[in-house]
Amino acid sequence: MPVVVEKTSSKITNKNMKQVLFTILALFVSVAVFAQKPVAEKSTQAGPRITFEESEYNFGDIYQGDKVEHVFTFENTGTEPLILTNVNVTCGCTATDWPRNPVAPGDTAQLKVTFNSAGKMGGQTKVITIISNAVNSQERVKMVGNILPPKKEETK
């Protein structure tokens, strides 16, 4: 006696398999969507916020032993007084002068940076890290440039 195989059972299985796969796919998509952290608007976050006019100053080519000074101007674009707690430099060749008093919302202040190129050669990048009570508590500015060999003394 011949064996009869009904194709309807295989169609039902394929249909059920498609439903299961679709359900799993929908589950993964919904998990991925809801797992994302909401992006906070910068302007809606209360507290002080430090905003620099420029984040990098390129002093170009200078001769070994020259000193370069630059003033980075920043503004408190937040809603509360900004207090700088520390300013860190990458080496002893860089010195800073920064305000110790609170900077009111909407006010500007200055960070003076001096780089001494004595003993340096070639491309230099000096990173200055500003630590404060701001919502963006660590900001960085840079001084970059190239140090040429010292000038040779002209003899007459």
Image: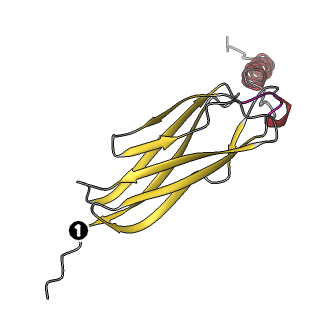
Q: Report the amino acid beneath label 1.
A: Pro
State the image coordinates of residue 76 (x, y, percent, origin top left): 75, 38
Depth check: 122 or 101 in front? 101
Which quarter of the picture shows residue 107?
A: top right
Depth check: 102 or 19 in front? 102
Span shown in magenta: 78-82
Q: Secondary structure at mark 1?
A: loop
Q: Residue at x 78, y 16 (%)?
A: 9
State the image coordinates of residue 128 (x, y, percent, origin top left): 48, 41
Whether residue 45 appears in magenta in the rendering, the answer is no
Image quadrant containing the C terminus: bottom left
- In the rendered view, tell whether residue 128 sits above or below residue 60: above
Q: Residue at x 67, y 11 (%)?
A: 1
For label 1, the residue is 150
Residue at the far left in the pictured view: 155
Whether residue 80 appears in magenta in the rendering, the answer is yes
Which quarter of the picture shows residue 60?
A: bottom left
